[in-house]
Amino acid sequence: MAFSYQEKLVWGQFLPMVLLYGYYFARVAEGRHGVAVGSLVGTLVWIAVIQVICSILVAALAQREPRDERDRLIDYKAFKLAYLSAIFVVFFVMWLVFSGGQAGIGRGMVVTCALGVLVGVEMLRMGTILVLHRMSVSA
Amino acid sequence: MKTKMKIGNQVRRLRFEHGEMTQQALAEAVGATRQTVLAIEAGKYAPSLELAFRIADAFGVGVEAVFQREYVG
C-alpha cells in the first residue's frame, strides 16, 4: 500500500501522539504520577521533538507533492468532525458538572479530562484524515 | 423520488490513448497529486469543475468526453 506525501506527514504526527500520550495516560491511570506538570510538559516536548524529526525525515526521503483540492477537502471534513465532537463532549461535561456529577472530582482529574478531550479530538481529526485518504470522499 | 447521480469518467482509457501517460504525469500536468488522480479514476472522488476542465485540457478534449453523468437507482 503506497502512501501519499500528505499521508506520510500525518502518520508522522499521529503515531508519536498515540504512543506518547498513550504512555502518559496509562501512567496517570495507574496513579503513578497524577497530573504532575513536569511529566506533562516532558510528554509535550517529546511529542513535538519526535513530530519535527518525522516531518524532516518525510520531507527528505519522500517525493514532495503539493496539497491539492482533495487534501483540502479531507482536512476540512476531518476538522469539522473533530470540532463537532469537541462541542458535544464539552456540553456533556457541562451537563455532568451542573447535574451534580462533579462530586469527588478533583482539579487534577479535571485537568486530565480536559487534556484527554484535546488529545482525543486531535487524534480523531488525524485519524479521520488517514481514513478519508483511503476512502471515497465527496464535497 | 430523486434519482442519485454518479460521475463516471474515462480518465484511465484516455491516459492509455495518450501514450500510456502515467498517473503521476497526469497529476503533474493538472496540478494535483497522484493519489487524487487514482481516486478520480476509481470513482472515489468527483473533482471540482476547475480540475475537471484541467484534466480535459491535458487530454485535449472537451470535459464531456472525460466525465459523464450516470444515474443510479
Image (cartoon, coloured by chain):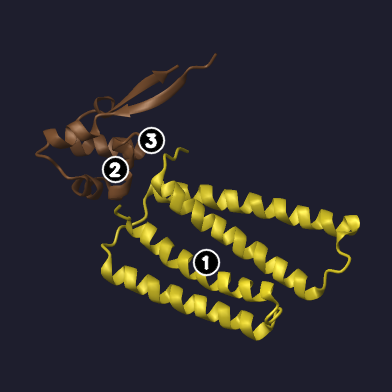
Chain colours: A yellow, B brown
Q: How crowded is mark 1: few (under 14 residues within 10 Å), some or many (20 or more)?
A: some
Gap between marks 1 and 2 measured at Cα: 31 Å
User: Spatial distance from mark 3 to mark 2, Cα to Cα?
Assistant: 10 Å
Does mark 2 fall on the same chain as mark 3? yes
Up-down relation of residue B41 to residue A80 (above or below)? above
Residue A138: x, y in percent? Answer: 45, 38
Quarter of the image with the C terminus of chain B in it: top left
Q: Residue furthest bottom?
A: A38
Q: Read off the chain for label 1.
A: A
Please name the residue that numbered disc 2 is placed on: B37
Q: In this view, does A47 lie to the left or right of A90?
A: left
Q: Which residue is drawn at 89% across and 55% down?
A: A99
In the rendered image, residue B50, in percent from the top left (x then y), is placed at 35, 39
Kind of residue at disc 3: Ala
Residue type at tag 1: Val
Please report the residue visible at 32 percent of the width from the left and 38 percent of the height from the top.
B40
Residue type indicated by callout 2 = Val
Q: In this view, does B3 lie above or below A16?
A: above
Residue A17 locus on image (x, y percent): 52, 68
Viewer-nearest residue: A85 or A26: A26
- Please report whichever mark, 3 or 2, sits nearer to the chain's N-terminal start: 2
Q: How many numbered marks, from 0 up?
A: 3
> Numbered disc 3: what chain?
B
Q: Residue B46: which disc? A: 3
Tag 2: Cα neighbours inside 10 Å, few (<14), some, or many (≥20)?
Answer: many
Q: Name the residue under label 1.
A: A18
Q: What element carries label 1?
A: helix
